[in-house]
Image (cartoon, rainbow, N blue to C red):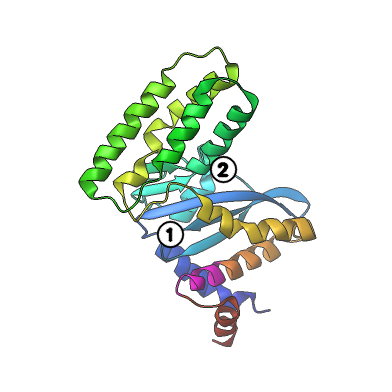
């Protein structure tokens, strides 16, 4: 019965998101009305929006952004989350997992070199000119690693994968303090939904999924300004 009270807060969060310069997104599977569906999350520095959808396609992103094109988009390499901003920062944490697997299963030195390169990428508190020089240096190092010949199929596949995303790996250095090198923030925002899915196995009706998404939108957006979940819910239902 209180679900309608969260709609205005959700609409306000969506409006704020559509003005953001940097947006991150991710999605996770969920069961809705007995069918496979998805729980999406979009967030910026000032808003968090959760969205229940029957599809994992790019149409969800296009409808959410309604024509707004941010300066930078942060996500993994999933195709539906590509091409929605001027620049794209690929999540380095996802690549680090692939590299770690290659290090554990292969004797080839290239994955080990990639792992060292990823560890050297995390730089902070540097002047803009220093960051630019660091970016050029890191790109040269990566180019040398990707050009290294290997007889290992796993290594070659990894080189191709990283090579395709090369122009998206160091975008965060062009926007110090604004863009994160990983999409861990989105994964943290999705974690309660993942737990909910495992406990309840999904939703019997789409209105329930949409209602919970609206509540999570209001609560998570309020958290950005220091509000507690209880305080945000109480304020909303008492309005």
**Quarter of the view holding residue 107:** top right
Question: How would you classify the magenta stretch by its main secondary structure?
Answer: helix
| In the depicted structure, whether residue 75 falls above or below residue 118 | below
What percent of the width, then of the height, locates residue 100? 58, 34
How far apart are labels 2 and 1 at the CA level? Answer: 21 Å
What percent of the width, then of the height, locates residue 89? 41, 43
Where, quadrant-wise, is the C terminus in this rendering? Answer: bottom right
Q: Earlier in the sequence, mark 2 or mark 1?
A: 1
Q: Magenta part of the protein: which range?
A: 217-225
Residue that sits furthest to the left in the current view: 129
Where, quadrant-wise, is the N terminus in this rendering? Answer: bottom right
What percent of the width, then of the height, locates residue 185? 51, 56
Q: Residues within 10 Å of mark 2 (few under 14, many from 20)?
A: some
Residue drawn at (46%, 34%) of the image: 116
In the image, taking residue 158 as reference, residue 117 lies left or right, namely left
Residue that sits furthest to the bottom in the current view: 238
Instruction: Say whether residue 224 is magenta.
Output: yes
Instruction: Say whether residue 236 is magenta.
Output: no
Task: Evaluate if marks 2 and 1 touch, with contact meaning CB atoms under 8 Å apart.
Answer: no
| In the depicted structure, whether residue 143 falls above or below residue 53 | above
> Is 121 or 52 nearer to us in this picture?
121
The label nearer to you, 2 versus 1, is 1
Residue picked out by circle 2: 57
Residue picked out by circle 1: 44
What percent of the width, then of the height, locates residue 97? 58, 38
- Can residue 128 be seen here? The reply is yes
């Amino acid at each position: 019965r209180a679900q309608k009270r969260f709609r205005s807060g959700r609409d306000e969060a969506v409006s704020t998101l559509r003005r953001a310069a940097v947006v991150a997104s991710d999605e996770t599977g969920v069961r809705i009305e007995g069918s496979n569906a998805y729980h999406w999350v979009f967030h910026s520095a000032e808003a968090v929006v959760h969205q229940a959808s029957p599809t994992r396609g790019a149409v969800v992103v296009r409808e959410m952004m309604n024509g707004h094109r941010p300066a930078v988009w942060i996500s993994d390499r999933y195709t539906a989350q590509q091409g929605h901003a001027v620049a794209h920062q690929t999540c380095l944490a996802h690549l680090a997992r692939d590299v770690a697997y290659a290090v554990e299963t292969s004797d080839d030195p290239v994955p080990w070199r990639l792992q060292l390169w990823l560890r050297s990428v995390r730089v902070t508190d540097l002047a803009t000119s220093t960051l630019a020089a660091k970016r050029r240096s890191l790109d040269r190092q990566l180019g040398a690693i990707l050009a290294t010949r290997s007889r290992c199929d796993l290594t070659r596949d990894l080189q191709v994968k990283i090579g395709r995303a090369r122009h998206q790996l160091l975008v965060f250095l062009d926007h110090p303090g604004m863009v994160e090198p990983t999409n861990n923030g989105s994964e943290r925002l999705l974690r309660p939904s993942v737990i909910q899915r495992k406990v309840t196995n999904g939703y019997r009706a789409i209105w329930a999924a949409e209602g919970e998404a609206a509540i999570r939108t209001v609560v998570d957006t309020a958290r950005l300004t220091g509000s507690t979940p209880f305080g945000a819910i109480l304020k909303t239902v008492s309005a």
